[in-house]
Amino acid sequence: MLMRYAWLAIVAAVAAGPAGAAGGIPDLAILRPDVQTGIANAGWKYDRYKDLASLDAGTAMTVADLKGPAVITHIHTTRHQPVAAMARGIVLEIWFDAADEPAVCVPLADFFGDGCNGGGMDFTSTFIECAPWSYNAYFPMPFKERARVVLRNDTGRNAMNYSYVEWRSLPEWDDRLGYFHATYQRKCFRLTREADETFFEVRGSGHLLGRQFSIATDEPAYAKFRCVMEGNNEVDVDGRPRALDYLGTEDSFTFSWGFQRPFAGLRAGMTLVDLATPSRLSIYRFHDHMPIRFRNSLAWRINWQHETGSFAAMKKAAEGGGAWVDYAAVFYWYQDAPGGYRHAPLEPLADRQKTVLRPAEASQVPAAKPPADKAPPDEAPAGR
């Protein structure tokens, strides 16, 4: 069975694009006249293609509607002004085959790692990129029958947008290929000695690829992300408690001694480290060197119950009625089914755009259930 899952990763990589080799020669040098490549455009109706759909207020825009078997290799979209309104006001959805629910449902900025409502720096990683006033994603997304990439504008403003999806055909579908998924959940809780929070839970068969966290707190005792950096990251796999156990949140993201300064690498990064009040942090990590595989279920939680060094600070904050922290988490994974995951409902737009979600507001958000060199012009107001 382990060999089967190892082979699944290889097949998925090959389906995504040039990744193998023939006679020691990289695939980029191998001619493939049997493979069709294509691009689907949307949003930019202001010159030649005036019939393109646009990202108007309160509407959904289909960027691509593709027939399989094929694989999406690149998604590109613009960023929008004003950032505070649009970064989480626009939502990315991706639907595969005939699924009744999207495999991807994430606010636009969070999906691309532009954390804390569009507050991160420009960066490039293996899978996500925040380029000057644009976003790019390079996750391979194979599908058997159909793929739809949709942007939904939940705001009251029209968004001047250009998006495209690049894809290539597959000669045939291989049942060992997994469907790409991504989900978002925001939760506000008291970070105390008793805290043990589940951030992601999924059932089915697949492997976890990575995660992105946006964290904000106005708790003085947690300045410089004290206590936030702690907590054992416990990953339960197929009913096995703590199949993986990272002894510290910063180390689970491959850093040490806290979150000290911005950094962007191919597999991990800190794209926002703001030590003001409220403090804001945006971090990502990918596990493509060793995807975390599961046959039946996977759960990721952070457990602060065994902390000792931070106990005094946590106790003081809790006794003062504080200790509140705000986490917005995105998880990326592949699964054997095109749909079936139940995403947590997004917060109301006004709450989604807040820097820190307060406790009373957070209580209204349903919990997740398992199954710039130059700024762009201001967006045109609704009804332009």
Image (cartoon, helix red, strand yellow):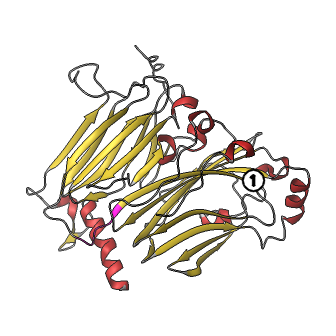
Q: Is 49 on the left or on the right of 255, as rendered?
A: left
Q: Amino acid at mark 1?
A: Phe
For residue 369, side relative to residue 65 (left or right) = right
- Badge 1 density bin: few <14, some 14–19, many ≥20, Cα 10 Å: many
Residue 277 quadrant: top right
Q: Is residue 93 above or below residue 11?
A: above
Label count reads: 1
Q: In the rendered image, is residue 290 in sight?
A: no
- Seen at 38% across and 55% down, the residue is 103
Q: Residue at x 24, y 43 (%)?
A: 65
Q: Is residue 178 magenta?
A: yes
* Residue at 51 percent of width and 47 percent of height: 113
158 vs 225, nearest the viewer: 158
Residue 319, how many percent across, how many down? Answer: 91, 55
Query: Is label 1 in a helix, a strand or a loop?
Result: helix
Residue at x 32%, y 66% (from the top left corner): 178
Residue 353 appears in view: yes
Split into 4 quadrants, where in the image is the C terminus?
top left
Indicate left or right for 249 with 307 as reference: left
Q: Is residue 35 magenta?
A: no
Answer with the quarter of the image where residue 192 lies.
bottom right
Q: Main secondary structure of the magenta part?
A: loop
Quadrant of the rendering where the N terminus is positioned: bottom left
User: In this picture, is 1 found above or below 369?
Assistant: below
Tell me where residue 229 appears, x and y as whole percent. Answer: 72, 60
Q: Which one is nearer the viewer's eye here, 278 or 365?
A: 365
Residue 323 position in % (x across, y down) = 81, 52
Residue found at the far top of this picture = 384
Task: Give the residue at mark 1.
Answer: 225
Q: Residue 34 in the image: x percent, y percent?
A: 8, 57
- For the magenta stretch, what is the residue range? 175-179
Q: Reply above or below: 132 against 17.
A: above
